[in-house]
Amino acid sequence: MCGIVAYIGHQQAFPIILKGLKRLEYRGYDSAGVALLNDDLLLYKKAGKVSNLEEYTKDKTLDSNVGIGHTRWATHGAPTDLNAHPHKSGDDRLAIIHNGIIENYSSLKKELIERGHSFESDTDTEVLIHLIEEIIKQDNVSLEEAVRYSLNEVVGAYAIVVIDKENPNKLIAARNSSPLVIGIGKDEFFVASDATPIIEYTKNVIYLDDEQVAIIERGEEVKIVDIANKTITPYIQELEMNLEAIEKDGYDHFMLKEIYEQPQSIRASMLGRLNSITGQVTLGGVEEFETKFMNAERIIFVACGTSWHSALVGEYMIEDLARIPVEVEYASEFRYRNPIITEKDIVIAISQSGETADTLAALELAKKKGATIYGICNVVGSSIARATDAGSYTHAGPEIGVASTKAFTAQITVLALMALTLAQKKGSITKTRYQELSNQLNDIPNLVTKVLESNDQIKYIAEQYKDAANFLYLGRGYNFPVALEGALKLKEISYIHAEGYPAAEMKHGPIALIDESMPVVAIATKVANYHKVVSNIQEVKARNGNIIGIVTEGDESIREISEHVIEVPKTDEFLDPLVSVIPLQLLSYHIAVLRGCNVDQPRNLAKSVTVE
Ligand code: G6P
């Protein structure tokens, strides 16, 4: 959470930082600010979105080649102008941007107050910059040394960049648990929370590791030390991302673009892994760990949010085909509940960003307990991807809309490939079934394209229900996680209360809520338990609920008892979530747009949750 950008070089820093902050707004958008160095330290910050900052700075002095910028998701202190970053030292010499939480800020603050410091904001970050200031004064050390010393005193997570009026040719950056990328251009450097603000200037980047400090100086090579002052040789790598992938490309919102990208992103997840001619599946990470997987007594998925929903689909798939016991855990619960984990367990983290603090911590716990750890991540080079023993990238391309869409279907695609690979190796699947499923998986992008053709019809349905106060989503089997995901999408972006439920569980509570004003989205495709879902729909009908059925093409029975039906093409039950979730994504999208909500940046949410 929170996005940070910094620049030092020969260009004007402000436009680069502002553009970078707009790219990072998915990480938080409570307030934004910049600090620029010319002869003075210029500081501009504003509550609200980056556009507020842009407006506010229109008539300000912005001439500078060095600066830092921040877009915030508030943790300590309300989202006000004063709490916005950057924060300054008491002597107005230093400025800092910070993503993360300094957990021992209150004791540090007390000590600093005793030494005469006073604070303008309620943030933990202001404490850190005062601590750096104090160290410079007391120990008479260089800026980089002071930053390093201070980081030895703090407990918590950070990605920071510090600038200093008396060292205008330097940026000092550091990280622990929050991501930080350094871009190396020609006579210029960039620092950011992810590569999106950097990509149009350079493809050469260094991903900083935990407890490392980078000294970035004009005309010099980047130097890296760890917080114990050991020199680290920087590893410069080339970014694979391209600029088009992070632009809206004519769509009104990133979310809509990402929904429409799914035929390509699902294909990209299969590329080089599913041979479309022979139907053979090869998933590198699993091959690498074949013995471990074959001897695994259990697979445990850890994840949060939408990724947790795809983990549920993964559980069904792997147990069904490969007959390995699977558990699915909320990372935030798992990490604190002293779970039983053995060396025979494989713990798989699923994460779009690869940065979710709870998921990372759950993985570290599993590693400590001796389990093999594996990652299914979208962001290449992310913290989870780097922490794991092996893994599979989802290759969905950058996902910018806060509500996850294409990352979800890419995760399920990788899980399907994993289940097929494991089943084949275990001999738990017949050749015919394997072939049938891999052929159908190969055809999924075409089926998704077909579902997207229902967009206008879905928009019409959205118009009918945009003012509903509650929604219920029902599904069984493989479509139960899809019901959860449909409800989550609606809550996230339209602020309508929604619940996802296993269709048969409805009788044990939610049925009491059903009346003529309750829309019920029933995922009732022609897969196992179809007739049982039809009975559940009848139960809703008997109580005057409004049914929106997601049905298999040509299904007439559900049409007769529903207010609306959205047809999806027939596929195997195992792959059904990949097509049945698409109408739910579009339904939420249109309802949110019709309600005037900010679809790409819903209130209170952030895409990359780097705090627990
Ligand atoms: C946040 C996002 C969700 C996402 C969840 C897990 O809550 O808003 O869209 O599903 O984090 O994120 P991850 O990057 O680990 O998949």
Image: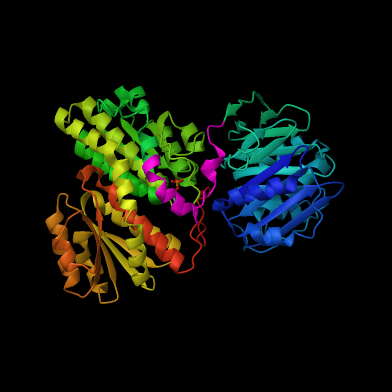
Residue 106 falls inside the magenta stretch = no
Q: Is residue 564 above or below residue 166?
A: below
Image quadrant where residue 198 sits: top right
Quick check: 10 left or right of 537? right
Q: Residue at x 64, y 57 (%)?
A: 50
Q: Residue at x 78, y 46 (%)?
A: 133
Coordinates of residue 5 in the picture (x, y in percent): 66, 45
Depth order, front residue of 41/400? 400
Quick check: 51 left or right of 572? right
Image quadrant where residue 422 sits: top left
Image quadrant where residue 243 sits: top right
Residue 253 falls inside the magenta stretch = yes
- Residue at the limit of the structure toward the bottom, as seen here: 516
Residue stretch in magenta: 239-265
Q: Is residue 516 above or below residue 483?
A: below
Coordinates of residue 79 in the picture (x, y in percent): 62, 62
For the rendered model, the colour scheme is rainbow
- Residue at the limit of the structure toward the right, as seen here: 39
Query: Is residue 244 visible to us here?
Result: yes
Coordinates of residue 444 in the picture (x, y in percent): 29, 41
Depth order, front residue of 560/296? 560
Coordinates of residue 1 in the picture (x, y in percent): 55, 50
Quick check: 64 left or right of 551? right
Query: Is residue 337 visible to us here?
Result: no
Q: How many marks?
A: 0
